[in-house]
Amino acid sequence: MYEYRGYALEVSVEAVRPDQAGRSMLAAHRRYAAIVTFAASDRPFETLRLSEAGGLPFSVEVDALMGGYSAAQRVIDDHLDKTGI
């Protein structure tokens, strides 16, 4: 859980299946998506599911965590810039 410019951010990681068939995967081939939930007093909770650029999942958990946090900061910055805050 982090705070950024008045928003509460929660970043977590979710393992992504390598295909739609749902077959089991080896730990060495796991990929990850970042799940970001953020809220402020003037805005309800919102959740984003994020991958690396190009829509591909992250290859390691720490990259997903940091990528999710960085992306959430950009979303908040863009929102605040558009609203003139």
Image (cartoon, rainbow, N blue to C red):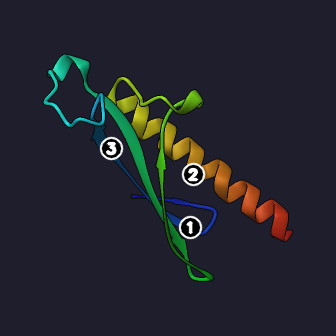
Mark closest to the chain's N terminus, 2 or 3: 3
Residue 83 spot, x, y in % from top left: 82, 70
Tag count: 3
Q: Which residue type does callout 2 highlight?
A: Ala
Mark closest to the chain's N terminus, 3 or 1: 1
Q: Which residue type does callout 3 highlight?
A: Val
In the rendered view, tell whether residue 7 sits above or below residue 68. Answer: below
Residue 3 spot, x, y in % from top left: 51, 61
Residue placed under numbered mark 1 in the picture: 7
The quadrant of the image that shows the N terminus is bottom left
Q: Quadrant of residue 59?
A: top left
Numbered disc in front, either 2 or 1: 2
- Distance of mark 2 from mark 1, alpha carbons? 10 Å
State if disc 1 and disc 2 touch (CB < 8 Å): yes
Crowding near the residue tagged with mark 2, few <14, some 14–19, many ≥20 C-alpha atoms within 10 Å: many
Label placed on residue 72:
2
Is residue 60 or residue 9 the one in the foreground? 60
Q: Quadrant of residue 15?
A: top left
- Distance of mark 2 from mark 3, alpha carbons? 14 Å
Residue at image location 67% in from the left, 48% down from the top: 74
Q: Which residue type does callout 1 highlight?
A: Tyr
Residue placed under numbered mark 3 in the picture: 13
Q: Quadrant of residue 17?
A: top left
Residue, far top: 28
